[in-house]
Amino acid sequence: MNTPTLETERFILRKFSENDLEALFKIYSDKEVNRFLPWYPLKTMDEAKQF
């Protein structure tokens, strides 16, 4: 998929990369952060890779 990058002076929104995997897992594995999302929290790094 061709995901555009949006960039401003203070913000960059881009497609996830392998370098983001650890941070993504940390956020999506936290039960409190994701308590209103029925398909989370993630339990393994493999689940984060599939995201």
Image (spheres, helix red, strand yellow):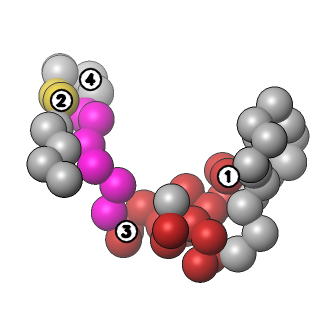
Q: Secondary structure at mark 2?
A: strand
**Mark 3: which amino acid?**
Asn
Q: Secondary structure at mark 1?
A: helix
Instruction: Looking at the image, tell me whether mark 1 or mark 2 is earlier in sequence order.
Output: 2
> Label 2: how many residues lie within 10 Å, few (<14), some (14-19) or many (20+)?
few
- In the depicted structure, whether residue 45 falls above or below residue 34: below
**Mark 4: which amino acid?**
Arg
Q: Which residue is mark 1?
A: 28
The Cα atoms of the two marked residues, 4 and 1, are separated by 24 Å
> Label 4: how many residues lie within 10 Å, few (<14), some (14-19) or many (20+)?
few
Q: Secondary structure at mark 4?
A: loop
Q: Secondary structure at mark 3?
A: helix
Q: Which residue is mark 3?
A: 19
> Residue 22: where, in percent of width, then height?
54, 68
Hey, which quadrant is residue 10 in on the image? top left
Residue 42 at least partly seen: yes
> Label 3: how many residues lie within 10 Å, few (<14), some (14-19) or many (20+)?
few
Position of 47 with respect to 37 (left or right) is: left
Q: Which residue is mark 4?
A: 10
The Cα atoms of the two marked residues, 1 and 2, are separated by 23 Å
The Cα atoms of the two marked residues, 3 and 2, are separated by 19 Å
